[in-house]
Image: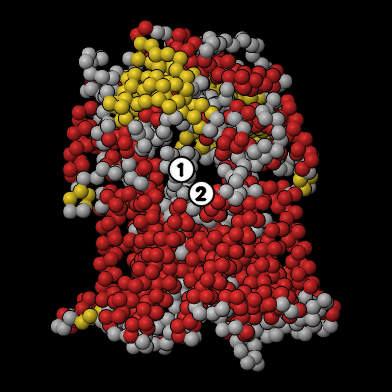
């Protein structure tokens, strides 16, 4: 796809970007050929987004040069980057929800006549772009963004960037919010754009996407470039090795199925989200003591609402939840904590920790009615401090300072502190939502081992994760959630990642009776 | 479609409530000749400063800055107008001086609100507390300045603005007394409402204001300086509150700095009016008119021999606000109001 | 980094709370002193520009605040009100609830204290025992009324999403209007020369110890200090206080930890309103002995916002801040009589203090530029 004589679309040389003492990018080189698709691959925190933000003019690099179409550039703002045709499609869409698709696309570049906006000119131009690349959003130009699904919003973002004249497109984790079908559509679109002469960089941490979509792949690790390879000349295994610096172990120890008492029994659970949309549509599940149930699925298929419904953070539309034989459907969150339901929350930044509290004060979070920390409503700060120090010691939280502000800890250490605190409740049931998201490898192992230990000790555990390897490693059974239902319950020893992927995309495994034991019209029971 | 859909949902609600309130009122009004042109004109006179302040306030809030200091800026506007009139023409200033006073009020409040905007945007002051402070400062310094100038807290009688009468046309029933024998300031308020609606929903600057309050990053990445938009909107809101104070004074013809001053809560009603009008200039103006009508109704009832304490009747707008906020819960507040915005570079 | 998905009003409050609670204690004190000093300097500048002698004005300020026993008593009397109303505001702000309605709750508490005492006085024996009984009944009634009047906007916020900033401001106007209407109507003392309720009996009041002032008793101040300490203990040492403060810091974390957000809002507002109601009770029992048209009552409840902010919403910090405001206000009364400078100058200065307290960043940047404060983020 490379045009022979033209200079590369983008050439980054020796880019170094520091935030204080932290080096986010260390002398990174990257060359984007004309009309090609380049994947920027790396784990969370490897410096991908920082590098692209430098290219997009959001950050100034400390060292290194940016060359676009053969000319060296200095970008002081995204506007500068845009002026030479570099546009970015952000992971968090830069769209104004109550405004329409059309208004969003033309924002900042409005065609006007006599001071008023000339919508018909804009409409023509957008329809032109849409027909050129086969977008379907031109029928929705007057729809408000808030009424669009995420896939459509992304297309609006892309059209907006094209409308502004971008030749070089940067996509920040474009597939993170998409369903597998939408991912396919996106990859087709990228190819169409490349055929039309656009050059693209997309950020990803998913090996298969990089292999399928890209011509070239650059891998970043700890802010440094590990190398650039042709997609045609490499394999997933090679890429994985480049990303993490060692072979990734997807192994799981096969385990005996448990026969403990049911700890959690949920029946015909229906839950609505904040916008009053039904996100959980009739889920049945049972978790026994000594068992880990994994819930897999693409984000946004009702996992969050299901867990919130069971932990008492969200009331059920209908259905019931029983805990240790007792009906807890009407119990408040606080009562459920007191009963012994612990929850490692999805979002440790906003839920799990009060960021500007010390670890001591955070150790009380969730324990406000639990003795010995609080007796008859009066806090015993000495006991709370001891608790915090115990967690810090046992879970190896760094820095080992109970008076440190939670915000000053790294993600992994924050997560270890939360896990320690939640286990400290001495619960019978633990919900762990994305327990290792954004956590360093060492802490991942540690948290996994603790969860497995607790399982051995007879706790019932529900793990929600979008990382398949994590689900497969930890679970005794895997429930796959799709559009608010358990589409299937599978045995992790007898399922492949491909099969899980199909299930997550909403395709039932026909003709595989041994996997889908109880397929009924309403969905599977766990 | 777009603008309509933006507000249609609310309009239906507002319309419904409006009808529920208005139909019986109008029925009773016609029956008892409660609604006269005099009543309508007096209501318009009360409503116009509220509407002007409300539109200023909603521009600021749309852009992401909650200007809770409208009342304070109105006090400064009214005071400046009174001082200017008095300074130029003594206790019986001519009509021309009234117009100069209006301009002076806008200029003074532009300066004050520019300082306010710098504190809010550059120094990230707490918007609510700083806005309250503007009110306190107005309440404190207005009597000081009044005492310095007039030796007491009241300006005494100055001039109020004359109606513009178009001979002949003024005789047309219904339209005549409203449009052709009317205070020019009320006529200008009509124009102002229409223009501010058009500006907000039909020009690029209007789009930028909306985006600045809803998703400033989106505006930033579109290459527009968010804080410049917010400065403009905040200064505009202060200036419009100042103009509103001056319009109030031009109708009343005197300034009194005791208690809550001549402004007497109308700036707060301005905030309430745009909430009630769901951040739409036209809705805000209609809400202001409703408050104007309520304000005048006790007077009107008295002329009919119905004695209702004006004190109680004057509370009605406040009660309505509480009820409306309760029934409709959250207003569609722009999502980034109160968030200082920092571009990442 | 994404500010787009945060919900408006909440963010306003969160940020306000963050900023208020973030700064180190020293920094807070520094900002408070700098705000006050700057406001006073600007005030003096305005005095000078108005053609008065600023040195004389400054001197009058000090004499008016602490220059005599009478001035001291007046300062302490006003400080008592500022401290109580300030604590009422602080309680709510700490929990991230913007109770701007302390003035209304104060007025409702005041009238609810006066009327039961007036009605019940004929039924009880006069003298100290009757006096104490009536004080207890009246104060309880005032506290309850203040609490209920604050619980209303709390409930409206919690269960209907009505913005409490707006509703409490509206309820201030409504309280002033209705109480004013009552005092001019049903509750008016027909024999009084002015618009007011019946006077409380002689024996209903605090004994005069230390200060021989008819409108200040050290008992009132003592009760106030005790309430401050109680509030501080509730906030720092109880599960309820932790729930409240955590809600103010980070609502989502509070909900996660089992705090019922709605109930906490109502409880916080009620608590705050009870303190405001107590302020109203002390106002009538210690100071006025009756209730007048609330239009004419000073805006303690609004100034309380400044007091609380000056103290960074710390109940203990409210004591010095309240003393400062008491002193300023007391100096205002002195200046009213003994100086040509309009006494409202003081109100304007208070407004400036509030303005500067709202913008701590101003002083941080100034400190950073002049190389003073140094170690800040």
* Percent of width and height locating residue B49: 36, 71
Relative to A520, is B188 on the left or the right? Answer: left
Q: Chain of mark 2?
A: C
At x 39%, y 67%, the residue is: B109
Numbered tag placed on residue C25 in the rendering: none
Tell me, yes or no, if residue B201 can be seen here. Answer: yes
Image quadrant where residue C211 sits: bottom right
The residue that appears at 49% across and 52% down in the rendered structure is: B124
A431 or C223: nearer the viewer: C223
Q: How is the image coloured?
A: secondary structure
The image position of residue B211, as x and y in percent, is 36, 47
> Please, is residue A261 above or below residue A79 in the view?
above
Q: Secondary structure at mark 1?
A: loop
Is residue B143 visible in the rendered image? The answer is no
> Does the residue at mark 1 contact the one at mark 2 (Cβ under 8 Å)?
yes
How far apart in space, not on screen, are marks 1 and 2 (Cα)? 9 Å
Mark carried by residue C3: 1
Q: Residue furthest left?
A: B168
Residue B253 sits in which quadrant?
Answer: bottom left
- Number of labels in the image equals 2
- Location of residue A28 with respect to C30 vertically, above or below: above
**Disc 1 is attached to a residue of which chain?**
C
Identify the residue at image location x=32%, y=41%: B222
* Residue for badge 2: C11
Instruction: State left or right for residue B281 relative to residue A250.
Output: left
Vertical arrangement, residue B28 with respect to residue A443, above or below: below
Question: Is A14 above or below relative to C298?
Answer: above
Residue nearer the viewer, A329 or C193: C193
Quadrant occupied by the C terminus of chain C: top right
Near mark 1 (Cα within 10 A), the count class, few <14, some 14-19 or many ≥20, is: some
Which residue is at a point 59% across and 11% down the rendered structure image? A252
Comes first in the chain, label 1 or label 2: 1
């Amino acid at each position: 796809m490379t045009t022979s004589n033209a200079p590369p679309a983008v050439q980054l040389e020796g880019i170094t970007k520091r935030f204080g003492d932290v080096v986010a990018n260390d002398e990174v080189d990257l060359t984007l050929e004309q009309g090609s698709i380049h994947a920027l691959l790396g784990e969370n925190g490897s410096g991908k987004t920082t590098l692209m933000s430098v290219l997009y003019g959001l950050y100034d690099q400390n060292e290194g040069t940016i060359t676009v179409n053969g000319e060296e550039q200095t970008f002081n703002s995204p506007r500068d980057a845009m002026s030479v045709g570099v546009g970015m499609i952000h992971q968090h869409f830069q769209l104004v929800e109550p405004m329409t698709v059309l208004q969003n696309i033309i924002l900042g570049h409005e065609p006007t006549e006599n001071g008023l906006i000339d919508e018909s000119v804009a409409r023509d131009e957008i329809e032109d772009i849409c027909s050129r690349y086969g977008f379907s959003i031109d029928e929705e130009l007057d729809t408000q963004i808030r009424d669009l699904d995420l896939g459509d919003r992304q297309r609006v973002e892309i059209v907006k960037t094209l409308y502004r004249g971008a030749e070089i497109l940067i996509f920040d984790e474009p597939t993170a919010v998409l369903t597998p079908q939408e991912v396919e559509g996106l990859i087709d679109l990228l190819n169409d754009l490349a055929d039309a002469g656009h050059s693209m960089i997309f950020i990803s941490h998913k090996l298969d996407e990089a292999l399928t979509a890209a011509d070239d792949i650059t891998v970043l690790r700890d802010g440094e470039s590990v190398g650039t390879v042709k997609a045609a000349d490499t394999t997933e295994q090679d890429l994985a090795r480049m990303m993490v610096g060692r072979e990734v172990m997807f192994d799981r120890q096969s385990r005996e199925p448990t026969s403990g008492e049911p700890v959690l029994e949920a029946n015909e659970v229906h839950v609505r989200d904040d916008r009053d949309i039904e996100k959980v549509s009739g889920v049945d599940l049972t978790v026994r003591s000594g068992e880990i149930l994994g819930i897999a699925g693409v984000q946004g298929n009702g996992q969050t609402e299901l867990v919130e419904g069971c932990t008492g953070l969200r009331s059920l539309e209908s259905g019931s939840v029983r805990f240790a034989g007792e009906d807890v459907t009407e119990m408040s969150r606080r009562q459920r904590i007191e009963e012994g339901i612990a929850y490692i929350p999805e979002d440790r930044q906003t839920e799990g920790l009060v960021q500007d509290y010390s670890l001591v004060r955070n150790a009380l979070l969730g324990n406000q009615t639990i003795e010995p920390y609080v007796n008859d409503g009066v806090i015993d700060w000495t006991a709370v401090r001891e608790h915090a120090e115990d967690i810090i010691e046992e879970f190896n939280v760094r820095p080992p300072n109970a008076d440190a502000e939670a915000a000053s800890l790294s993600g992994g250490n924050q997560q270890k502190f939360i896990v320690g605190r939640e286990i400290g409740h001495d619960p019978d049931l633990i919900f762990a939502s994305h327990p290792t998201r954004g956590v360093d490898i060492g802490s991942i192992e540690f948290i996994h081992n603790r969860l497995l230990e607790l399982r051995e000790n007879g706790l019932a555990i529900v793990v929600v994760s979008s990382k398949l390897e994590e689900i497969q490693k930890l679970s005794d059974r895997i429930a796959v959630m799709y559009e608010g239902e358990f589409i299937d319950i599978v045995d992790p020893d007898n399922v492949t990642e491909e099969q899980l992927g199909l299930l997550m995309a909403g395709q039932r495994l026909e003709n595989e009776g041994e996997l889908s034991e109880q397929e009924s019209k309403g969905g599977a029971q766990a | 479609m777009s603008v309509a859909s933006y507000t249609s949902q609310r309009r239906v609600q507002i319309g419904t409530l409006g009808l529920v309130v208005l139909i019986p009122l109008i029925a009773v009004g016609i029956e008892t000749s409660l609604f006269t042109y005099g009543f309508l004109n007096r209501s318009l006179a009360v409503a116009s400063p509220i509407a002007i302040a409300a539109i200023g306030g909603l521009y600021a809030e749309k852009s992401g800055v909650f200007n809770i200091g409208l009342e304070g800026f109105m006090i400064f506007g009214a005071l400046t107008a009174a001082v200017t009139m008095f300074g130029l023409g003594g206790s019986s200033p001519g009509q021309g001086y009234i117009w100069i006073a209006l301009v002076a009020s806008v200029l003074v409040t532009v300066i004050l609100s520019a300082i306010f905007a710098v504190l809010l945007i550059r120094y990230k002051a707490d918007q609510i507390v700083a806005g309250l402070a503007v009110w306190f400062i107005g309440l404190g310094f207005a009597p000081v300045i009044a005492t310095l100038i007039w030796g007491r807290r009241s300006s005494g009688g100055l001039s109020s603005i004359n109606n513009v009468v178009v001979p002949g046309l003024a005789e047309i029933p219904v339209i005549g007394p409203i449009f052709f024998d009317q205070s020019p300031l009320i006529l200008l308020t009509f124009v102002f409402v229409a223009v501010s609606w058009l500006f907000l929903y039909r020009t690029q600057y209007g789009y930028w204001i909306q985006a600045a309050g809803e998703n400033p990053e989106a505006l930033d990445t579109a290459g527009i300086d968010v804080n410049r938009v917010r400065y403009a909107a905040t200064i505009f809101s202060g200036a419009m509150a100042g103009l509103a104070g001056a319009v109030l004074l031009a109708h009343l013809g005197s300034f009194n700095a005791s208690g809550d001053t001549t402004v007497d809560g109308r700036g707060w009603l301005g905030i309430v009016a745009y909430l009630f009008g769901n951040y739409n200039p036209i809705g805000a103006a209609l809400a202001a008119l409703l408050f104007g009508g309520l304000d005048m109704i006790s007077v009107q009832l008295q002329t009919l021999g119905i004695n209702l304490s004006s004190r109680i009747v004057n509370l009605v707008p406040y009660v309505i606000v509480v009820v409306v906020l309760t029934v409709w819960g959250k207003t569609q507040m722009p999502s980034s109001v109160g968030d200082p915005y920092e571009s990442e570079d | 980094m994404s500010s787009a998905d945060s919900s408006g009003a909440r963010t306003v409050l969160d940020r306000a709370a963050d900023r208020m609670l973030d700064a180190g204690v020293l920094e807070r004190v520094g900002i408070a002193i700098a705000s006050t000093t700057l406001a006073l300097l600007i005030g003096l500048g305005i005095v000078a520009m108005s053609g008065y002698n600023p040195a004389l004005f400054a001197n009058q300020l000090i004499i008016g605040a602490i220059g005599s026993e009478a001035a001291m008593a007046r300062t302490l009397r006003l400080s008592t009100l500022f401290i109580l109303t300030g604590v009422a505001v602080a309680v709510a702000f700490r929990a991230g609830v913007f109770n701007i309605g302390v003035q209304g709750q104060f007025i409702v508490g005041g009238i609810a204290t006066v009327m039961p005492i007036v009605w019940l006085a004929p039924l009880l024996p006069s003298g100290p025992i009757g006096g104490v009984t009536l004080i207890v009944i009246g104060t309880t009634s005032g506290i309850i009324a203040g609490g209920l009047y604050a619980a209303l906007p709390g409930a409206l916020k919690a269960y209907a999403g009505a913005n409490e900033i707006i509703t409490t401001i509206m309820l201030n106007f409504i309280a002033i209007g209705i109480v004013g209407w009552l005092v001019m109507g049903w509750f008016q003392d027909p024999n009084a020369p002015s618009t007011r309720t019946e006077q409380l009996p002689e024996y209903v009041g605090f004994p005069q110890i230390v200060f021989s002032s008819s409108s200040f008793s050290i008992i009132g101040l003592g009760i106030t200090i005790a309430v401050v300490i109680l509030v501080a203990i509730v906030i720092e040492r109880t599960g309820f206080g932790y729930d409240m403060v955590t809600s103010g810091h980070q609502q989502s974390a509070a909900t996660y930890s089992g705090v019922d957000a709605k109930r906490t809002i109502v409880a916080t507002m009620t608590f705050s309103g009870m303190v405001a109601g107590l302020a109203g009770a002390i106002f009538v029992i210690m100071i006025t002995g009756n209730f007048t048209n609330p239009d004419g009552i000073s805006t303690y409840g609004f100034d309380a916002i400044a007091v609380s902010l000056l103290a960074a919403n710390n109940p203990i910090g409210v004591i010095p801040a309240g003393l400062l405001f008491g002193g300023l206000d007391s100096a205002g009364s002195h200046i009213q009589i003994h100086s040509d400078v309009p006494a409202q100058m003081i109100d304007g200065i208070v407004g400036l203090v509030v303005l500067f307290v709202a913008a701590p960043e101003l002083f941080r940047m100034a400190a950073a530029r002049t190389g003073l404060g140094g170690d800040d983020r």
